[in-house]
Amino acid sequence: MPEYDYDLFTIGAGSGGVRASRVAAAHGAKVAVAEEHQVGGTCVIRGCVPKKMLVYGAHFAEDLVDARNFGWDIGETKFDWVRLRDHVLKDVARLSGLYTETLESHDVEIFHERAEITGDHQITLASGKVVTAKYILISTGARPSLLDFPGSEHAITSNEAFHLDELPKRVIIAGGGYIANEFAGIFNEFGSKVCIVNRSDVLLRSYDESLRDRLLQISLTKGIDFKFHTSFKSIEKQDDGTLLVKFDGCDDQVVDLVMFATGRDPNIEGLGLETVGVETGKKGEIVVDEYSKTNVDYIYAVGDVTNRVQLTPVAIREGQAFADTVFNNDPRTIDYDCIPSAVFSHPPIAAVGMTEGEARNKLGSIKVYQSDFRPMKNVVAGRNERGLYKMICDAETGRIVGIHMIGPEAPEIMQGAAVAVKAGLTKADFDATVAIHPTMAEELVLMK
């Protein structure tokens, strides 16, 4: 039997890598992790967590205005971007420290440097140190995709958005996915003039069409501009620091910031995958089986680098399943069906299961129930913004195959509703449940 320095060496200390390393160590494995940036990965450092903090901050823009109709005289208000930015980054550092403490408390050795696979069961660190491991786990995540055209180097991505020295007065966001729409809402609420530029006319492609249309209507009402069927020709930096952006499909614009939000690419460069022959797919993703194993018997991969479902909770489950399978003799796989998701736009979207279009294509005969309503808070505040809930059911069995929501607190409400969909409950089960009144969530059990 060969002797190795570690039972497990994890490359990348994001959500999936940290969970896998901690659980493997708890099962008795000797574990090491290499992370060239902060421990915590995209979600904690430059993704979901700081983004949601900015979303919370952005909500106050409307809440402070609405407060008057609820009897509050607030007086003159002023937003301080730098104060919020620094507070968010401070909390990110705190969370990264907690992730580090979690690993250290389980006796996981942390190398704060880059690692590369340089031979069979062999890893070389940036410092030159060479170690060996019985198993190698790759959990290096993904990074924002970049567009390539003259002057594209003047654009930023979501990574840099958390570190801006000042808010842009005018910003163009390239893309139509969740990151584009979330940051459009954030910048707009903070007072920036926002324009989303998309090469197609579809926003949030994987979400139900009714919700996508509703978000577009509301976003336009809030002052966000959209340019569809439009692509970039060039960006030219002006003497005053502004950016002259030229397009195919619409007039040129002068703005203060251009941000790319056009998808994410797996981080596989410089890992040494070719050295040991790890198979990758068309998008650069690491190809794995249902147990997250690559074509190389001792190398596994979890999280966004595999491009299965790019969601933090999924990466965590994959990491847990890997550790239980390999180090606890408890083979586990992940069920990717009915995974709930959310877009923290203004207002937010949440969904689980099939869209109406998907259900019609797959099931043929379906029933669609919906509630199009004005939340009570919006009524009192004098806002005309309406929420929309949809329930998609199999016409033959009544089983709920999808729920889709746009409106205040939709993601919070959806977490509970997703349990019901996952459990295979029917419309009759919802109808038999007494409503909690007055709430927005009661619409789920009152839909016709």
Image: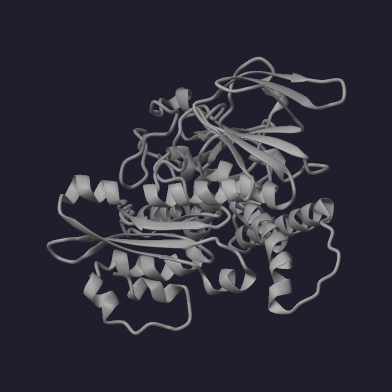
Position of residue 390 measured from the top left corner of the image (x, y, whole percent): 35, 61
- Asked whether 137 or 90 is in front, the reply is 90
User: For this view, does 424 lie left or right of residue 160?
Assistant: left
Residue at the farthest top position: 150
User: For this view, does 126 lie left or right of residue 75?
Assistant: left
User: Above or below — where is 247 with respect to 123?
Assistant: above
Q: Quadrant of residue 102?
A: bottom right
- Asked whether 381 or 31 is in front, the reply is 381
User: For this view, does 146 lie left or right of residue 316?
Assistant: right
Position of residue 328 measured from the top left corner of the image (x, y, whole percent): 38, 60
Residue at the image position 47 percent from the left and 35 percent from the top: 121
User: Above or below — where is 234 with respect to 209?
Assistant: above
Q: Quadrant of residue 120?
A: top left
Position of residue 56 measured from the top left corner of the image (x, y, whole percent): 66, 61
User: Above or below — where is 366 with respect to 439?
Assistant: above
Residue at the image position 50 percent from the left and 27 percent from the top: 199
- Quadrant occupied by the C terminus: bottom left
